[in-house]
Image: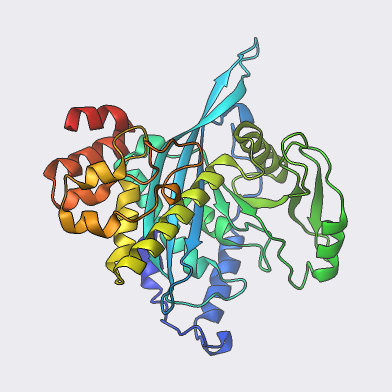
Amino acid sequence: MDLAYLLSLELPICKVSDSPSNIPSIQHWTSLQHNLRAQLQDVDDPGWSLNVLRRVGGLDISFETGTTGTNRATAVLVVCELTVNQVNDENEGTASAMTEIYEDAVDVDMDLPYISGFLFVREVFAYELLLQRLRKSAPELEPDVFLVDGSGVFHPRQCGSASHFGISNGLRTIGVAKKLLCFDDFDKAAGEQVEQHMLCNFGDNIPLVGSSGFVYGLALRTAHPAKDTSSKRIYVSIGNGFCLESTKDVILKCCDVGGSYLPEPVRLADLTGRAIERTCKQIHQMQPGPEARQIAIDISNLLSNKSRKTLLDMLEEVSLDLHQRLASVQPESLKRKRSTVEELFLPLQALRIEKPWAANLHKECLCKQRAGEAMRVAL
């Protein structure tokens, strides 16, 4: 299934107050999930091993807050590359770092309300779009696996957003949920039992077993006690193209290298989405209007490398009007956690509005991922 097929579904536009029972496509969506579940691959692809893992994608959606009357969100794809060293006689290496090599964000208009069990209706379209943009601009950077902020088979019909996205596009995917989902086969009592189970050390886990005996996934401790003394855990499940053991191994590798309880690509995608939403909120407060969101996302998408001119320096080259609209945005809300004041997180795709060279710069940076070099050449 591709983006054209999803578009052909002609999803209805509903008010948030609409009851799910009044939405005629519920039966169709249920049937679609059952059909996709029948195609799910819950074993490793032939030839797969953890040692061949080099690029990992993270997909996340951040929702607009503090602005009434909209159903807008930001969908983000981040691709990270594993740096491998210490190769031994068996050609096995140890991953020492994860470096972001690609980042893209799109504006999402959530026409439908949240309906439990049918999150794919709101999310998969955006993930499909991000995948298409990646394949068009930088196909050589396509990940070996996509980590989706959501569920895979840990779902009432064993086909959450991670599975839907993976099966539809023939991709390896893993569901990474921050919250425990409960439904008929995995009820509140089962959830409470899992939550009460202590996970003390990195890699400790407990299976998520339904009353039917089906293993939906794992509650997994992904933070080292020395770095994080809390009891945080994530809930991982097969999306597509993996067995559960390999799912666990991929997640632990991404968390061990990144140092967070969240896999590094998902963590970075989450940070990007949140920063865009904060920026959008600030711009909206200065000058309300739908263009605020597009400015924020445009700013985020030009360059992925952060060591260049500050945002406001670049704005001076565009127009006084745009400069004034963004000048009061606080740098602290725009930069990454590890950035300095002079290395703001959100760069400026908005330059392409008035500067022809910016379009070429955007292409260079996204396709070749040499943002710093491209900036020096362009300026």
**Residue 67 horizontal side relative to residue 181, left or right:** left
Of residues 68 and 130, the one drawn nearer to the viewer in this rendering? 68
Quadrant in the picture for the C terminus: top left
Answer yes or no: is residue 172 visible. Answer: no
Q: Is residue 117 above or below residue 46?
A: below
Q: Number of callouts in the render? A: 0
The image quadrant that residue 357 belongs to is top left
Q: Position of residue 187 (x, y in %)?
A: 80, 70
Residue furthest toward the front?
328
Q: Is residue 340 above or below residue 128?
A: above
Query: Residue 202: percent from the left, percent from the top?
Result: 77, 37
Q: Nearer the viewer, residue 170 or 306?
A: 306
Q: Decide if residue 177 is on the left or right side of residue 135.
A: right
Viewer-closest of 242 and 62: 62
Residue under the point 24% across and 31% down? 374
Q: Quadrant of residue 216?
A: bottom right
Image side of residue 297 versus residue 375, left or right: right
Q: Front-most of 93 and 376?
A: 376
Q: Is residue 53 visible?
A: yes
The residue most toward the bottom is 22
What residue appears at the point 38 percent right and 76 percent down from the top-left corner?
10
x and y percentages locating residue 289 in the rendered image:
29, 72
Q: Quadrant of the N terminus?
A: bottom left
Residue 45 in picture, x, y percent from top left: 59, 39
Identity of the residue drawn at 65% across and 51% down: 238
